[in-house]
Image (cartoon, grey):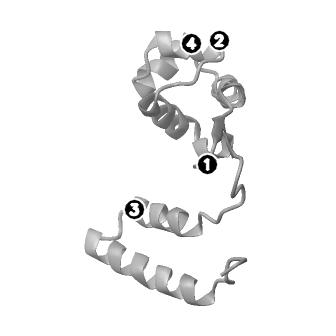
Amino acid sequence: MNKQSFDAQAFYEDLERKVRQEEVSWRQVGAATGVSPSTLTRMAQGRTPDAASLAALSAWAGLNPASYVELEVAKHQSNTLSEVSMLFRQDTALEPGARKQLESIVEAAYKSLAKPKPGK
């Protein structure tokens, strides 16, 4: 089992930086994201937000929550296929069937071209 640690303080600091850059209040952030004032206060005190709040705040601020997680093992695993899939999901020009076809094509090509993992 992978042990993991979410750096809530670093996430909050980057979120706070974004709030300053956008020149908005925390109340406005809460209204825009649906995150309660009590959750924002707890985060300021170093507590980790729940998954839904983390997702909403990350989307609002353009932050990748995975960037704040440290894994004890496999720190540098590739997320390329997940990232490509996410980009396809966000592309409004693609119908769901076309997106799945593209994902399959990219996955097959990636697997055939990627370097083998050590020990395999």
Q: Which amino acid, by three-letter code, is at mark 4?
A: Arg
Find residue 80 and report its horizontal and vertical position in percent: 59, 68
Element type where label 1 sits in the image: loop
Cα separation, mark 4 vs mark 2, equals 5 Å
Say which quarter of the image contains residue 16: top right
Q: Earlier in the sequence, mark 4 or mark 3?
A: 4
Q: Residue at x 59, y 41 (%)?
A: 65
Q: Which amino acid, by three-letter code, is at mark 1?
A: Asn
- Which residue matches tag 3? 89
Q: Which amino acid, by three-letter code, is at mark 3?
A: Arg
Element type where label 4 sits in the image: helix
- Which residue matches tag 2? 45
Residue 2, numbered label: 1
Nearest to the eye among marks 3 and 2: give it: 2
Nearest to the eye among marks 4 and 3: give it: 4
**Structural crowding at the residue carrying mark 3, measured as other residues with C-alpha within 10 Å and reported as few (<14), some (14–19) or many (≥20):** some
- Which residue matches tag 4? 42
Q: Residue at x 48, y 9 (%)?
A: 38
